Image (spheres, rainbow, N blue to C red):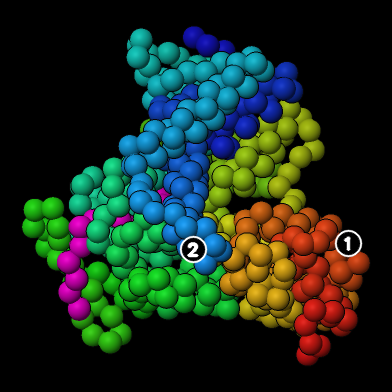
Amino acid sequence: MIEVDVAVIGGGPGGYVCAIRAAQLGLKTVIIEADRLGGECVNYGCIPSKSLITVAKLVDKVKEAEKYGLRASGISVDFVQMQKWKSEVVSRLVGGIELLLKGYHATILSGEAEVISKDKIVVATANGREEVSCKNLVIATGTRTSSLPGLEFDGDLVIGSKEGLELMGAPRRLLIVGGGAVGLEFASMYQKLASDVIVVEIMDQLLPGTDPDVVRVVHRKLEGRGAKVYVKSKVLRITKSGSEAKVEIETPAGNLTVEVDKILVSVGRKPRTERMNLEKIGVRTDPKGYVITDSRMQTNVSGVYAIGDVRGPPLLAHKASKEGVVAAECIAGMPSAADWKVIPDAVFCDPEVASAGLTEAKAVEAGFKVKRSRFPFAALGRALSTGEPEGFVKIISNEEDGLVLGVQIVGPEASNLISEAALAIEMGATVEDVALTIHPHPTLPEAIMEASELAAGRPIHQLKT
């Protein structure tokens, strides 16, 4: 029997951060992981996908290099080496997580956990069953990929994101079912690696819930590179034949049939709560199965906490990590809570998309008198000098006092730019504050300053509207 103050089930971005913070605070901590430390994000999602996206972007840049005066020939992609490099990146991060946990004296248990009661867990390890007695339990088990009836995963022809990151060659014809963040990242990546891409999305736009102005830029880029994009559409049926499939798609313009080599299904995720025995220990969940908590990450059962994707959208690694810190600090008796104003997000499609705070539609819905200000990357020296002039920065502010309510970015390095916007909103900055902040030239963040100057009524590098 292992006796601890805190038992964390799940070693993803929420779980391992929670375990580290708890151990830092002097709590005797054990973390239980059935697969690999780092969870879905590090092993099968965020990190491997961004590694491969980096390669695909580099390939694309080299192919376009002639317009810059750089001539290269015989460009090819060695998928074996690419996958090896991706695995090395992942392994290095997993090793780093293990080193940190051990460095803070958290105990690591590898195995499948079953919750017996709120203070007892049984772990099936490679060496047998291990019992854990805990004063506090943190559920950080994340989510798993959802499938669709008739599109069940077979690991070969019909695949999910995990298999999509392990392919040893670009499919000649790739159908992606689901035009959300994951689907579009795969679409952009494999398009650059020479796949003919088809995207089918049941909603009326790609990236449902995202500002339509932003989405139009991404949609246009995908189609401009040859992709077929069908919104308000769905897959009716597939007929497998050897290594390919015929797929019937229902679209607003009528049904059509396409032949493809791979079908990548990316239609959402569902909470991973098997063997948590939530009903048995009395933990409440919502209609979709996500664990309900308060702002301190505590469930309705005293001493039982939940963090990360298992407690619901947005399903983001950085959100999970912050929740892990909150849970650990609350267990340690600190006055911690989830009191952040915004959770920024980023999609690594082409061009990148990132946002923080309210969209224009949400701000209007919330009752604000909204001012919308945009600055195009096509008017920015740094964007032109890197050959990436597409997109814009859009700032949503309150017309009455200039308060920054939200920022949407579509364009180069949007994922790196959005943190400034998140900080501005968290600190209650106005467009005047951002406009008065000197930004180095020539850089991409100048676009945020320029959009703020427009919002403040004194644009320099665009005409006043």
Q: Left or right? Give the position of 157 relative to 442.
A: left
Give the SS element for disc 1: loop
Residue 166 image point, x, y percent:
33, 42
Residue at the spot of label 2: 66
| Most foreground residue, 157 or 152 | 157
Residue 436 image point, x, y percent:
91, 67
| Most foreground residue, 174 or 22 | 174
Would residue 263 be counted in the magenta stretch?
A: yes
> Disc 2 or 1, which lies upstream in sequence?
2
Residue 228 image point, x, y percent:
33, 73
The extreme bottom residue here reads 465
Q: Which quadrant of the figure contains the C terminus?
A: bottom right
Query: Is residue 67 visible to us here?
Result: yes
Number of residues whose C-alpha sits closer than 10 Å to that of mark 2, classed few (under 14), some (14–19) or many (20 or more)? few
Query: Is residue 149 visible to us here?
Result: no
The amino acid type found where label 1 is placed reads: Ile
* Residue appearing at x 84%, y 79% in the figure: 460
Would residue 85 be counted in the magenta stretch?
A: no
* Residue appearing at x 75%, y 50% in the figure: 339
Magenta part of the protein: which range? 256-271
Label 2 – label 1 distance at C-alpha: 35 Å
Q: Quadrant of residue 203?
A: bottom left
| Most foreground residue, 65 or 383 | 65
Q: Is residue 183 above or below residue 258?
A: above
Q: Quadrant of residue 138?
A: top right
* Residue appearing at x 62%, y 22% in the figure: 100
| Most foreground residue, 216 or 107 | 216
* Front: mark 2 or 1: 2
The amino acid type found where label 2 is placed reads: Glu
Residue at the spot of label 1: 438
Q: Left or right? Give the position of 315 relative to 429.
A: left
Number of residues whose C-alpha sits closer than 10 Å to that of mark 1, classed few (under 14), some (14–19) or many (20 or more)? few
